[in-house]
Amino acid sequence: MNLFRTKALSSFTRNIQQQKLQKNLGALDMLLLGVGCIMGTGIFVFTGVIAAKYAGPGIMISLLLSAIACAFCALCYSELASTVPFAGSAYTYAYTSLGEFFAWLVGWSLVLEYSLAASLVAAGWSAYTTGLFKSAGIELPQAFTSVAADGGLINVPAMLILLFLSVLLVRGTKESATINKILVGVKLSAVFIFLLLAGPKVNPANWSPLLPFGFSGVMTGAATIFLAYIGFDCVATAAEECKRPNRDLPIGIIGSLIVCAILYICVAAVLTGVVPYQELNNAEPVAFALRQLGYNIGSALVGTGAIAGLTTVLMAVMYGQTRIFFAMSRDGLIPAGICKIHPKYGTPHIVTIVSGILVAVIAGLIPVDILAELVNIGTLFAFLTTAIGVLVLRKTAPNAHRPFRCPAVNFVAPAAILCCAYLMYSLPIQTWIRYSIWTGIGLVIYFSYSYRHSTLGQEKEESLEKAV
C-alpha cells in the first residue's frame, strides 16, 4: 500500500517554504504562456498534414472534437490547479489524489511528452529557418541542418535554439515571459495576416466532399491533432510562480484553450477552402497556401510568424519540462540536488541546463517523427489521471479549499476520462509498444531508486519509528 501513499497539502506548503520560486507571473502572462505553447506546430504544420492524410475538410470537425475533449480536461485541470497551486502539473495532482506510484507514472509520461515535443518542434523551427534563408538566396549546408536519417549529419539550428532558450530560462521567468509576449504577438499577427489575405479567396467547392475519409478519418484526425492543443497543461506547471494562482490559473488554462480552438478552426476552414486538401501534405501548409494564391510577401511574413510561433512553443515546453523535473526532484523521486534554486535568478538552473543539453542532443542527432505519437499518448495518460484525481479528491477531501470548482463534475470528469481513453485507443499499436517500453524503463528507475529515496516515504518511516 506504500505505493499509493498520498501527499497532503501541508507537505507541499512546507517544501515550498524551504525552496520558493519567485512569483512573477500574472493572468496575462498565464494566458499568453498557454497560447504560446498551444499555437505553434499544430496551426503551422499539422493542420495541413492531417487534412491531407486523414480528415480532408473534415479537419474542422476533428479540431472541434479535440477541443471539446481538451475542454473537459481543462476544467478538471483548473480545479486541481487552484486547489493544489504548486509546481508539477498533473504529476503533483496525481501525488495528492491517487498516490506516489501513479504520480511517478504521470511524471515519467510528462518527461517523455515534453522532451520529444521540444525535439520535434525544434526540428520544425530549423526547417522554417532554413527555408527563410533559402528564400533570401542563402543555402545552408544540409549536413548541418538535418539529421543522418534525412541525409545530413547534425541539425545545428535545432540544437542552437534549444541551448539559447535554456540560457534564457535560467535567467528568470519574468524575462522569459516578456519575450514570450512579443513572440506571441508576432505569431498572432501572422495568423491574422493569413486569414485576411486568404479568407476572401475561399472557394466552398473545395469543402466538398466534407468527409472524404469518412467519420473514422475524422476521429483519427482528432486523435492525431490532439497534439496541437496539449500546451495548456504548461500553464499548470507555473503555479508556484503565479501571483494569484486561485484566479490566474483557470484564466490561463481555459482562456488559452478557447482562443486557440477558435483560431485553429478558422485557419483550417480557410486553408481547406483555398487549396484542395490533397495538396496540403507539406511542412508549411499556411505559407504554401499564400504562395499558391500569389501572395509571396504574405507567405514570407507568415513564415516569419511561424518561426516566432515555434519559438514560443519551445520556450513553454522547455519551461514545463524543467518544472516537472523540479517537482519530482524536490519529492526525492530523482536526485534532490537537481532542484537547487539559483541564488540570483530564482530558477532551478541545474535541471534547466541539463535537460536543455539532453533535448538539444536528441533534436540534433535523432529523427523524432516516428516517436511523435508518443507525445500524444503520454499527455493523454496525464489528462486521464487528472480527471480521475478530481473525482477522488472530491471524495477524500470534500472540505478542501477549491477557489475554482469544476462545474457538473460528475459529468465533466467522466467525459474527460472517456474522451482520453478513446483517443488513446485510436493511436497506432506501434505507439503503444514504444510507450510500454518507456514505462518499463520508468518502473525500473522507480523501484530501484525513487521508492527508497522518496521524501514522503522517509517522513512516514520516521513517524513510525517515533511512534514505536
Image (cartoon, rainbow, N blue to C red):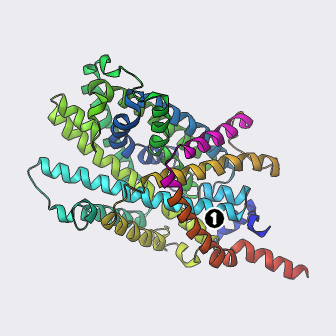
Q: Taking 105 as reference, is 293 left or right?
A: left
- 38 and 127: which one is in front? 127
Q: Give the percent coordinates (x, y) of residue 5.
A: 76, 65
Q: Is residue 40 visible?
A: no
Question: In the figure, 79 relative to 191: above or below?
Answer: below
Mark 1 lies on a secondary structure that is helix
Residue reaching furthest to the right: 468
Q: Amino acid at mark 1?
A: Trp
Q: Quadrant of the N terminus?
A: bottom right
Q: Main secondary structure of the magenta part?
A: helix
**Label 1 crowd bin: few (<14), some (14–19), many (20+), radius 10 Å:** many
Residue reaching furthest to the left: 137
Q: Give the percent coordinates (x, y) of residue 67.
A: 52, 35
Membership of 265 in magenta stretch: no
Magenta extent: 409-432
How many numbered tags mark residues here? 1
Q: Find residue 86 and report its image quarter.
A: bottom right
Question: In the figure, 247 relative to 146: above or below?
Answer: above
Membership of 431 in magenta stretch: yes
